[in-house]
Amino acid sequence: MLDGRRVLLIIAGGIAAYKSLELIRRLRDRGARVRCVMTRAAHQFVTPLAVASLSEDKVYSDLFSLTDESEMGHIRLSREADLIVVAPATADLIARMAAGLADDLAATALLASDKPVMIAPAMNAQMWAHPATEANLATLARRGILRVGPGAGLLACGEVGLGRMAEPAEILAAIEAFFVADHRLAGRRALVTSGPTREPIDPVRYLSNYSSGKQGHAIAAALAALGAETVLVSGPTQERTPPGVCLVAVESAREMLAACEAALPVDVAVMAAAVADWRVEGAAAQKLKKNGEGAPVLRLVENPDILATIARRRNDRPALVVGFAAETENIIANARAKRAKKGCDWVLANDVSPGTGTFGGDRNTIHLVDADGVEDWPVMTKTEVARRLADRIAARLPSRIH
Ligand code: CTP
């Protein structure tokens, strides 16, 4: 049920606007309070009278209407909601949101809002596939804006493809899921590193390690699931980018460090990547050839320590910096020493001895080392480790959205 939940529904001008009428009815049936904003173009598809009758409230459309402003300014309109739903979200409104425009009441309310936003895109398949729309959606996803649909099928324009607005039942399910979900990290920014790094020897060869990226990707997923705006800086892996996470793909340790620094400021940084400790000095610009003079000798130089660099930032050090310690012996003692040496707050120590199956496997045994001591976690899957870590982080960094 959605008893008393306040939903601000923004209806933009697309043929799918007729489905929004049913969405209003379903939301009302579930006990939600629905207030509606219509764009000018939306008036061409459904009448404000129908929207007002179903929502049993006044419909808002004009940014500069004196009556509207005296009764309910755009700031209050956006603040007095628990969730803003844009359905249908047209290509035009999505573009205006991405650009931060405030050229009508709908766009202004969205820009002035500090509330979570969910969009249900609806447009022609070509518009959906256009690189401009793709870039706008990526921008919105990076800002933590939730999305439901679109689906594929016969579109109103007669073409077949992606772009059909999600059905009202599907949008309702997403809204209900939103309200039962845990958003303790909403308004927080998180940085996670994952996977191995690749250090070039020449244009076709590299040094690397067996890291799968499973643990780092699972952590990014768990932080994003709690509402954190999450940047995942990862070396090459087979893992899927978790929903709602912004991936920055890198190869070498130096690229990973630059990407992490570019992601600052963040509230929490979790360094789960297996960064190559060394790189080849003076990697060859051309492929190394067998030239009869014997095997080449590679000279290695140390890579920057990303965890230590981020933990030692002066003005923009994250409030919480978490590192991993991959150890094969004296696990706790080594983890304590690593915590002190790198200046991070927490170290998640894990046993990566051959036979434990940790490296590249699905399970992990963690000991959380902080200033107060050690907490031993039972053997868990990497997903469970990620959820427990996200839970600990949420307890340390309370939510900013109220
Ligand atoms: N790390 C890092 N940059 C590096 C090396 C490690 O950010 N150049 C981070 C890892 O992501 C991890 C932590 O430091 O969070 C510890 O990694 P680990 O491999 O256990 O330690 P090392 O620093 O490499 O030390 P050693 O190999 O000597 O145990």
Image (cartoon, grey):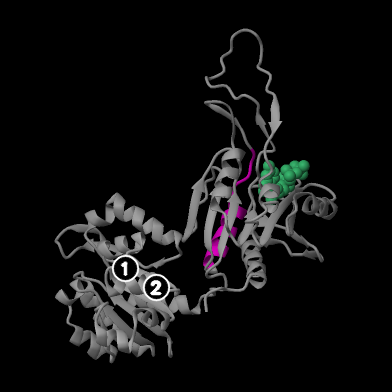
Q: Looking at mark 2, is its residue's CB closer than 8 Å to ligand 1?
A: no
**Above or below 75: residue 265:** above
Predominant secondary structure, magenta span: helix
Q: Which residue is mark 2?
A: 112
How far from the left and from the top, in percent, is residue 227?
A: 52, 68
- Is 216 inside the magenta-drawn segment? yes
Magenta segment? 209-225
In the picture, measured across the screen, residue 63 lies left or right of residue 248, that is left
Foreground pick, 149 / 362: 149
Q: List x then y, in percent, for residue 172.
A: 36, 78
Residue 193 locus on image (x, y percent): 60, 51
Residue type pointed to by label 1: Ala
Query: Residues at badges 2 and 1 in contact (C-beta under 8 Å)?
Result: yes
The residue that appears at 35% across and 60% down in the rendered structure is: 98
User: Compared to 114, does 289 lie above or below?
Assistant: above
Front-lying residue, 339 or 30: 339
**Identity, as a three-letter code, of the amino acid under mark 2:** Ala
Residue at 58 percent across and 48 percent down: it is 261
Per the rendering, the mark at residue 22 is none
Q: Quick check: 115 left or right of 107?
A: right
What residue is shown with label 1? 102
- In the image: residue 307, left or right of residue 108: right
Q: Using the image as rendered, state which of residue 319 and residue 272 is in the foreground.
A: 319
Q: Earlier in the sequence, mark 2 or mark 1?
A: 1
Place residue 266 in its image quadrant. bottom right
The answer to whether residue 391 is above or below residue 214 is below
